[in-house]
Amino acid sequence: MSISCVNAVLRGVFGIDPTAKLILIILAEHTNRNGVAWPSVATIARYACISEHRTKHVLRKLQEDEWFALESKGSRPGRTSRRRLNMDKLVRKSVADDTISKDENVSPATPLTSTDVSPLDVSVGSLKCGS
């Protein structure tokens, strides 16, 4: 289920804050077959490389915008909130975007060759999230 949820977010969610989309992807990656996810705020913050305070703010906004519903709130330390993704909203948006892209006359991208990319472009080095 999580792969299809991640795909729905990647293909169907546009026009929102990039951090909000990243958090939706993280939630989608953690869903069970019923669309319920329960990663902790600390886990979401670590994956998104943002503070827990910012994570809570973005989660509140996503809930207000009905991207997910809070099924249960973590009532004590060690208990995480359970969030049910709004799959109807994700699928409806994804299908609408597919319809638009199929109607547009867009040519496929030209593949890159090894001469199009310099070694500096592909050398990323060691990346690490801030704490």
Image: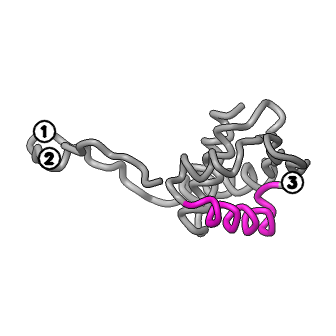
Main SS category, magenta section: helix
Question: In 3D space, how far apart are the residues under numbered discs 1 and 2 (Cα atoms)?
Answer: 6 Å
**Residue at the spot x=71%, y=42% of the render?**
39
**Label 1 close to label 2 by CB (< 8 Å):** yes
Q: Secondary structure at mark 2?
A: loop
| Residue picked out by circle 2 | 117
| Residue picked out by circle 1 | 114
Using residue 16 as the reference point, say whether residue 113 is left or right of it.
left
**Residue at the spot x=56%, y=62% of the render?**
19
Magenta segment, which residues?
Answer: 51-68
Residue 119 pos. (x, y %): 11, 43
Picture quadrant where residue 68 is located: bottom right
**Residue at the spot x=76%, y=58% of the render?**
67
Q: Secondary structure at mark 3?
A: strand
- Is residue 121 within the magenta segment? no
Residue 48 pos. (x, y %): 54, 52
Q: Earlier in the sequence, mark 2 or mark 3?
A: 3
Question: In 3D space, how far apart are the residues under numbered discs 3 and 1 (Cα atoms)?
Answer: 48 Å
Q: Earlier in the sequence, mark 3 or mark 1?
A: 3
| Residue picked out by circle 3 | 70
